[in-house]
Amino acid sequence: MKLASGTTVISNGQLIDCTGAPPIPQGTVVIKDGRILYAGAGEGAPEVPPEAEHIDARGGTILPGLVEAHFHATYFNVEKLEDLDIKYPVEYVTLLASVNCKLALDCGYTSARSGGCLFNCDVWLKTAIENDLIPGPRLSTSGREICSAGGLMDWNPEFRKIGMDGLVFCINGVEDARKAVRALVKDGVEWVKTYPTGDAAWPDVNDHHTLCMTFEEMHAVVATAHNHKLKVTGHCRATEGIKNALRAGYDAVEHATFIDDEGLDLLLSRKVPVCPGLQFELASINNGPAYKMSQQVIDGHQETLEGGAESARRILRGGGIVGMGGDYGFAWNPHGHYARELTFFVNYVGFTPMETLVCATRHGAEMMGRSHEFGTLEAGKLGDVLVVEGDVLKDISLLENRENILAVLQGGVLKAGKLAPYQVAQIPASGA
């Protein structure tokens, strides 16, 4: 991804650098050649050349670009489980994914961590974004997921005589686990996503207290992945599934819904980050009846919502790393509404607006392993900056409305927001 050349000054707004420092009422960010030169009080800003570009924050808020920590680029208007693996061909899925990537950037998300991706599309989405062929967030990739046969993601009945090759590897035992990871190694992913537990969406077979992988399978995944310098995460709701993941050496946990004291101690001692992904639960409860969800499923989502909120509070209060990502892409929880997760954490979970913004920026960058590059507004980091009309500390829901997004910069390049010019994609001469 190309960095901007020259100098850009963003001023006339409240600066939230997301390091944990207090906001600066009249802040200024100076970006030189794509990297932050200065972020602080306006009166302390360095001299800039006369030809420098200026962005007026209009008295609003200047903060780091947001990080969507559980991004399903290839999920699009999913209503039924079958929509995830047999509804569309890979060609159309890829096009839908590119639309979702642009949408995320338009919403102020300059980076995203994949939570699983059909056909390994995220590997090539990342390549296209990094080569400036399509707009989108900086991606960490995970590709196809891993689940034991008969587990949460293995829903196609045997009589169909079709597999799940586009979405998951269905494994039986440790040898299958190693084989699946090795296939992902060849595909070039960064994260291996697994399904150690079930979910409220499948209450009769694999509910949110069911284990869907053995410890031995999980350990084989970790050992193989770590050997090839890949990281491992997993969909973990059930208490024992969370602890199995932590004991097996997982590098992150998705949800950690029903964590107990022992699990919390394990998680905090290893500083394993968590993405609770609670907006999906709220959306399922509120919108589920319209999509003919059974009361049993909705009740399960309610239990998951309450358990997940309590776990998230305990993890953050214990000093843990909590990323913001709402499991978007389902018909009742569509892409483009990513910041609803932030509003929910303030209004329902009880995080302060500042805590929530730090989770949505710095913690997300830490989960991606790239906090040295972005996630806070500090000298030397990439010029990934979001400028929003209004005071987001007083009303974090301002981030939900794209009409409030003034500017989204990546590497100092103005790519989205009301102040961004219309840009036609430029194809490199090499065609690469």
Image (spheres, rainbow, N blue to C red):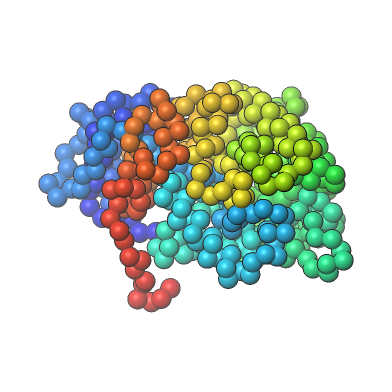
| Residue 298 percent across, percent down from the top left | 73, 37
Would residue 185 appear left or right of 377 to someone viewing this image? right
Q: On screen, 42 above or below 149?
A: above
Q: Measured from the top left, where is residue 372 in percent x and y?
A: 45, 43
Quadrant of residue 380 within the rendered picture? top left
Question: How many numbered badges does the structure rendering display?
Answer: 0
Q: Is residue 77 left or right of residue 208?
A: left
Task: Determine the residue positioned at 72% across, 55% down.
Answer: 81
Q: Where is residue 209 in the image (x, y as percent from the top left)?
A: 81, 37
At horizontal 65% and vertical 34% (from top left) the residue drawn is: 270
Indicate whether 320 appears above or below 151.
above
- Front residue of 372 and 209: 209
Q: Is residue 302 visible from the viewing direction of this image?
A: yes
- The residue depicted at 76 percent of the width and 53 percent of the height is 153
Image quarter of the N terminus: bottom left
Q: Where is residue 304 in the image (x, y as percent from the top left)?
A: 71, 34
Question: Visible in this render: residue 371?
Answer: no
Q: Which of 254 and 73 is in front in this view?
A: 73
Which residue is situated farthest in the right direction here? 159
Q: In which quarter of the image is the C terminus?
A: bottom left
The furthest residue to the left: 50
User: Quarter of the image holding residue 424?
Assistant: bottom left
272 to the left or right of 409: right
Residue 314 sits in quarter: top right
Q: Looking at the image, is 132 positioned above or below residue 411?
A: below
